[in-house]
């Protein structure tokens, strides 16, 4: 049964607090999407971990009239492997991945990456799907979704939609989600046990959003790279695979020269952000370094 209350702020307070909003606490997906259908046109928003939304509300940069809190919705905490894919429900926290959530390569990769996301208190509240819906260009999970061509399951009163990562990320903090759609689940393909992976990111202080990051995953056959995935995050408006760099690696031995070639191609192909954090030129240089290091990490891990 959905509950509703209204937050009106503190009277006569000079503190910077959220603008008044109605708070809804649905307990089923059906209730949640019905509330979204009713209130999304009036800037009704999903509240997941609140680690991005609540700070913007506190500064009144966001003033949603309705918050639809999905934390009590049954079934959204699903985290299980089904049909060769890891299914991650909308209330699964970043912290769920700190220890491998699944056996095998994907669990290890996510465990390593999760430690780069913010700080522990944020990781215990913030959700995997919230990061994907928020689509910050520097989100580690968004870049992972792009690397693995994840599938997003969106639900509304109109039905269920499956959206693949290349169609999902549309631009700077912009996705294919409609305003009345709930991102109910993200599905990541499990990785073969014999692939090698690396992840590298650069930020000024531990826990900050990355200025640039790279994922590198490849499969060796007969001593040469048979297939690979190279993706970047943080450097452009949205994360994406750099297929030209992947193509360049095909059939090559995993040597420093091969990795440098792929990294140079990636750096050439990016359209880097130029903002208050750093210049486009510096980001381009970082892409080169991140891709090269992620590939080297993959090779060294395989050799260990
Ligand atoms: C100091 C600080 C440092 C941080 N550092 C990092 C970092 O290094 N890397 C990183 O990736 N993130 C970082 N974050 C962000 C953090 O990971 C957030 O948890 C995450 O971006 C959003 O997840 P959330 O569950 O908190 O979403 P919320 O804040 O609840 O929501 C964010 C937005 O997504 C929408 N939304 C959320 N869930 C859904 C859903 N299921 N369906 C539809 N819409 C939805 C909301 O309506 C809202 O618009 C940082 C945050 C802080 C405060």
Image: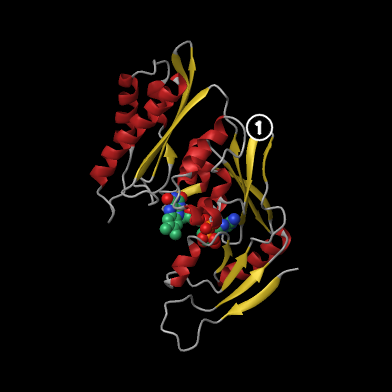
Front residue of 294 and 275: 294
Q: Is mark 1 within 8 Å of ligand 1?
A: no
- Which of the image's four quarters has the N terminus? bottom right
Residue 301 in view here: yes
Q: Residue at x 32, y 43 (%)?
A: 271
Q: Residue at x 34, y 26 (%)?
A: 262
Q: Position of residue 215 (x, y in %)?
A: 43, 35
Query: How many residues crowd around disc 1 within 10 Å: few (fewer than 14), some, or many (20 or more)?
Result: few
Which residue is labeled 1 in the image? 84
Residue 285 figure quarter:
top left
Above or below, comparing residue 243 to residue 65 in the picture: above
Above or below, comparing residue 225 to residue 283 in the picture: above
Front residue of 245 and 21: 21
Front residue of 214 and 153: 214
Q: Residue at x 33, y 39 (%)?
A: 270
Residue 171 in view here: no
Q: Is residue 287 left or right of residue 22?
A: left
């Amino acid at each position: 049964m959905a509950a509703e209350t209204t937050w009106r702020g503190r009277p006569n307070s000079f503190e910077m607090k959220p603008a008044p909003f109605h708070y809804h606490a649905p307990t089923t997906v059906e209730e949640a999407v019905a509330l979204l259908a009713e209130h999304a046109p009036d800037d009704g928003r999903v509240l997941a971990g609140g680690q991005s939304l609540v700070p913007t509300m506190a500064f009144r940069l966001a003033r949603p009239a309705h918050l639809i809190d999905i934390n009590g919705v049954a079934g959204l905490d699903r985290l299980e492997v089904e049909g060769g894919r890891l299914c991650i429900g909308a209330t699964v926290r970043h912290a769920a991945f700190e220890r491998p959530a699944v056996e095998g390569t994907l669990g290890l990769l996510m465990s390593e990456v999760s430690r780069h996301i913010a700080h522990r208190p944020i990781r215990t509240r913030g959700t995997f799907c919230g990061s994907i819906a928020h689509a910050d260009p520097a989100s580690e999970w968004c870049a992972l979704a792009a690397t693995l061509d994840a599938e997003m399951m969106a639900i509304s009163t109109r039905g269920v939609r499956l959206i693949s990562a290349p169609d999902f990320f549309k631009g700077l903090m912009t996705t294919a989600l409609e305003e009345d759609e709930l991102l109910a689940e993200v599905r990541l393909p499990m990785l073969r046990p014999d692939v090698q992976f690396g992840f590298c990111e650069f930020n000024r202080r531990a826990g900050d959003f990355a200025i640039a990051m790279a994922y590198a995953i490849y499969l060796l056959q007969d001593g040469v790279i048979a297939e690979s995935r190279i993706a970047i995050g943080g450097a452009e408006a949205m994360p994406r695979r750099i297929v030209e760099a992947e193509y360049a690696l095909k059939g090559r031995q995993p040597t420093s020269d091969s990795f440098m070639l792929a990294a140079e191609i990636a750096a050439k192909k990016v359209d880097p952000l130029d903002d208050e954090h750093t210049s486009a030129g510096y980001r381009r240089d970082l892409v080169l370094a991140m891709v090269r290091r992620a590939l080297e990490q993959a090779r060294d891990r395989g050799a260990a």
